[in-house]
Image (cartoon, rainbow, N blue to C red):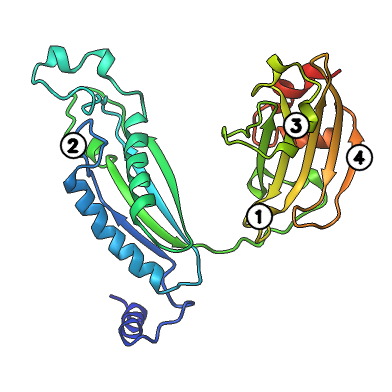
Amino acid sequence: MRLNENILRIKEVMGLITEQEQPKVFEINLGNLFDSGKYILNQQVIASINGVILKLREFAKKTPTTPVVVSVESSESKVPNYDREKFPSTGDRNVDFTDDKKLGVGALSALRAKSIEDYLNKTLRVPNAKIVVVNKGAQGPSWKTPFNANDPAYTANQYVKLLAKLETPVATQPTTDYTKVTKEMILTGSYYCNGKNSKGVVASANVYEPQCKLLPQNFKDGKHMSVYETKWNENVVKDAYVRPLLRWSFTWGSNNKIVKITRIEGLKNGENTTTKDISGNDPEMIYYLNINGTDVYSTYIKPNLG
């Protein structure tokens, strides 16, 4: 152990450590927690995770005012995987290794990460903690002769890591030039004439009723967008989830076409908003609609312009 680490440990024991001196990253590699083809947590896996949870809580307790990001990093090798939760091994290779039991590339890694994420969400109990999944998918060398699944070249990529990191604010600042806004800087959301948002959650009436009231009932579905909005991400402004950057309201006519598009700029906390009607090919609107790399404009708006 180096001198600085010794000093840090002594201060920690004596209760003299400051948040500035507190290590900002805590990582545990749990290795290959699961049996081949398994992804549901059994008691042995839970016991291993519970041990890590205690350490994560201690890590977070030392800097209670700083948010902690807990990452679940999962990886698999390129050895073919078979679903042994749904299809337990029978010992007969002709039965156990058929195509219908095979998992897609990266699927096992994703299933394992999801199981651990769900468990942490229920049991971590760390204030201000945010749990994220980093699915590395299939890594390492390709599966080839002599087809030895126990080869270290394969097993080295079969692991689950839990990493806790103190969240450091990013120095990004809001900009008024929309062409300089990147997808990392904002959060996006959309609402539809079926009265739900993009996640299927029931929305407030003001984001679909006025926009869709003239639309025939059989068209009030999840394909007719009523509102699209963007918000600054948490690394740009502190109250990301309550300050929309912009909102576009799409009013539908009885002819099943968008007859008006209104751009709304303002805040949800009671401050003044500014509104103006815009054209269906407004470049700023198109930029934000497609900012995540998906052509939302061509899917939901352009074909329906009146």
**In the displayed structure image, the side of residue 180 where residue 51 appears, left or right:** left
Callout 4: SS: strand
Q: How crowded is mark 2: few (under 14 residues within 10 Å), some or many (20 or more)?
A: few
Q: Which of the two labelled residues, at mark 1 and mark 2, occupies the earlier sequence position?
A: 2
Q: Which amino acid type is shown beneath numbered disc 2?
A: Asp
Q: Which amino acid type is shown beneath numbered disc 3?
A: Glu
Task: Give residue 240's mark.
Answer: 1
The answer, for residue 139, to whether it is visible in the render is no
Q: Which amino acid type is shown beneath numbered disc 1?
A: Ala
**In the displayed structure image, the side of residue 63 where residue 258 appears, left or right:** right
Q: Where is residue 111 in the image (x, y as percent from the top left)?
A: 34, 35
Query: Vertically, is 174 above or below 61?
Result: above
Task: Give residue 259's mark.
Answer: none
Q: Which of the two labelled residues, at mark 2 and mark 3, occupies the earlier sequence position?
A: 2
Quadrant of the frame with the C terminus: top right
Callout 2: SS: loop
Residue where numbered disc 3 is placed = 209
Residue where numbered disc 4 is placed = 276
For discs 4 and 2, the disc positioned in front in the rendered view: 4
Separation of marks 1 and 2 at Cα, in angstroms: 41 Å
Q: Which of the two labelled residues, at mark 1 and mark 3, occupies the earlier sequence position?
A: 3
Residue where numbered disc 2 is placed = 35
Query: Vertically, is 233 above or below 97?
Result: below
Residue at 49% over, 77% down: 20
